[in-house]
């Protein structure tokens, strides 16, 4: 790695630490009459605590590592295309796991999204 580039793990850890501090401060300093008092972590069930820690630490940190590694490997422009696929993946997961209805409009939209990302990737690759 060159001198001017940080390791993706360092960048991801720094982003998560700053975000956690800012979000935590905002949650505890917010006026309780506007947003309600924050829930004490200790008052959550063990399953809820595990879920919060897993989502906040493992999943988010892994996502940051993947994104920064992709940026280093294929550029930020191509990496940003991942965000366009999210609605199509959400549609698929909703149909598979939540029995959400699927009609021709939704299929056409998903095909357009995935096709557009494929065209852009092919053109920039």
Image: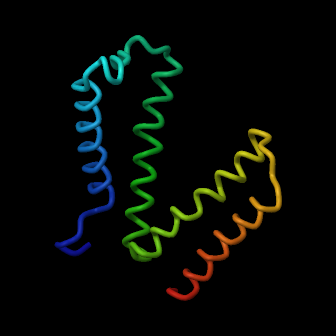
User: Which quadrant of the rendered structure holds the N terminus?
Assistant: bottom left
35 is higher (above) or lower (below) than 14: above
In the picture, residue 44 is in which quadrant? top left
Q: Position of residue 123 (x, y in %)?
A: 55, 88
Front residue of this view, candidates 3 and 15:
15
Q: Is residue 55 left or right of residue 11?
A: right
Q: Is residue 1 left or right of residue 45?
A: left
Front residue of this view, candidates 79 and 4:
79
- What colour-coding does the image apply? rainbow
Q: Position of residue 108 (x, y in %)?
A: 75, 67
Q: Position of residue 81 (x, y in %)?
A: 51, 69
Instruction: Count every numbered label the image shows and give the total.
Output: 0
Outermost front residue: 34
In the picture, residue 30 is in which quadrant? top left
Q: Is residue 52 left or right of residue 86?
A: left
Which residue occupies 48% across, 25% down?
A: 50
In the picture, residue 80 is in which quadrant? bottom left
Which residue occupies 72% across, 69% down?
A: 111
Q: Is residue 113 left or right of residue 8?
A: right
Outermost top residue: 43
Which residue occupies 23% across, 70% down?
A: 5
């Amino acid at each position: 790695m060159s001198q001017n580039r940080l390791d993706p793990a360092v960048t991801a850890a720094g982003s998560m630490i700053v975000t956690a501090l800012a979000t935590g401060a905002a949650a505890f300093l917010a006026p309780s009459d506007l947003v309600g008092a924050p829930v004490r972590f200790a008052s959550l069930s063990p399953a809820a605590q595990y879920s919060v820690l897993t989502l906040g630490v493992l999943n988010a940190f892994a996502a940051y590592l993947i994104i920064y590694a992709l940026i280093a490997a294929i550029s930020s422009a191509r990496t940003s295309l991942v965000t366009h696929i999210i609605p199509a993946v959400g549609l698929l997961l909703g149909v598979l796991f939540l029995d959400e209805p699927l009609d021709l409009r939704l299929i056409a939209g998903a095909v357009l999204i995935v096709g557009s990302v494929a065209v852009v990737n092919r053109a920039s690759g």
